[in-house]
Image (spheres, helix red, strand yellow):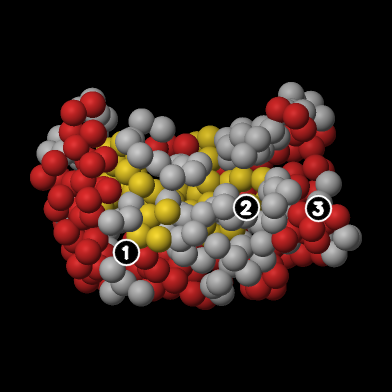
């Protein structure tokens, strides 16, 4: 397989065939994200993709899922995407599901009918970086979408019958908006009703605007105890949601993994134990992106 630069995939796609169909991120302006700063965004040409599919057809027969990289594969025009899906299933007929990252803008550029068509062609899962439901935080980090737009996009994905996984980022509001960020994010998640919620903790990357804001004092990262407070407020606010819930990313100080509403009280108990210092936590050098 031919990959350009570092390729990022969701943890749950660890055993998928990673097919890089776009390079970089078409938005690439989020102040907290440095993952694609070294890449000029482009959609790969079909001959490049065909070579990778030929490799996968020969060497990846035990992998049953495909993940389309990089940052927002759904930016590919719809008819081109339809042809891509048909090509994947023609070359890899044993594959049972295709997944991809998509940002809010690209989801809203698709009609419900177009998303349903992609589902019929094998799209099973969309990962969307929500990060926050707090509009001042979304604007500050240049996310490119409002909370209302995020809800609209998420609901469109769910109505199309697709599995929707959204990621939320503790600490993104800084000290200034810490608890407001948590409360608004919980409110948005209640309105959106995703299939899966993934919680990460902000780690400042040296090549980002947010890291520079931190160096100059314009952004102040919440302390660890404040991050636990954010997580508790967020979880406590998730009433009426049926979803997978994971806070087991390497960036987090401890792990939560289960289902809502079944495990909500267990999660709150574990968060309280972490805040009280009665459970093991990762050290700073054990955390990673």
Question: Cα distance, mark 1 to mark 3?
Answer: 36 Å
Question: Cα distance, mark 2 to mark 1?
Answer: 22 Å
Residue depicted at x 10% and y 45%: 90
Out of 2 and 150, give the one closest to the viewer: 2
Q: How many marks?
A: 3
| Residue behind mark 2 | 34
Image mark for residue 76 = 1
From the viewer's perspective, tell me whether residue 225 is left or right of residue 169: right
Give the position of the C terminus as an image quadrant: top right
Q: Is residue 137 above or below residue 227?
A: below
The crowding category of the residue bearing disc 3, from other C-alpha atoms within 10 Å (few below 14, some 14 to 19, many at least 20), is many
* Picture coordinates of residue 276, whole percent (x, y): 82, 34
From the viewer's perspective, tell me whether residue 34 is left or right of residue 154: right
Element carrying mark 3? loop
The image quadrant that residue 273 belongs to is top right
**Of the residues under marks 3 and 2, which one precedes in the sequence?**
2
């Amino acid at each position: 397989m031919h990959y350009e630069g570092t390729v990022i995939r969701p943890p749950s796609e660890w055993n998928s065939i990673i097919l890089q169909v776009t390079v970089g991120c078409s938005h690439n302006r989020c102040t907290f994200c440095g993952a694609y700063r070294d890449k000029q965004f482009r959609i790969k040409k079909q001959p490049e993709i065909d070579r990778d599919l030929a490799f996968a057809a020969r060497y990846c027969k035990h992998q049953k899922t495909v993940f389309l990289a990089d940052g927002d594969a759904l930016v590919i025009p719809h008819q081109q995407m339809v042809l891509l899906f048909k090509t994947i299933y023609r070359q890899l007929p044993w594959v049972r599901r295709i997944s991809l990252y998509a940002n809010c803008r690209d989801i809203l550029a698709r009609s419900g009918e177009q998303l349903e068509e992609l589902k019929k062609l094998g799209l099973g899962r969309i990962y969307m970086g929500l990060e926050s439901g707090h509009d001042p935080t979304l604007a500050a980090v240049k996310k490119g979408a409002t909370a209302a737009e995020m809800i609209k996009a998420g609901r469109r994905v769910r109505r199309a019958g697709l599995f929707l996984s959204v990621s939320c980022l503790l600490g993104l509001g800084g000290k200034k908006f810490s608890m407001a960020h948590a409360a608004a994010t919980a409110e948005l998640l209640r309105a959106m009703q995703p299939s899966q919620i993934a919680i990460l903790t902000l780690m400042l990357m040296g090549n980002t605007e947010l890291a520079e804001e931190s160096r100059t004092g314009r952004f102040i990262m919440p302390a660890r105890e404040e991050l636990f407070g954010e997580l508790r407020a967020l979880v406590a606010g998730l009433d009426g949601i049926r979803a997978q819930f994971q806070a087991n990313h390497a960036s987090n100080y401890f792990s939560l993994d289960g289902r809502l509403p079944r495990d909500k009280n267990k999660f709150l108990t574990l968060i309280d134990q972490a805040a009280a210092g009665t459970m093991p936590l990762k050290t700073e050098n054990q955390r990673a992106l």
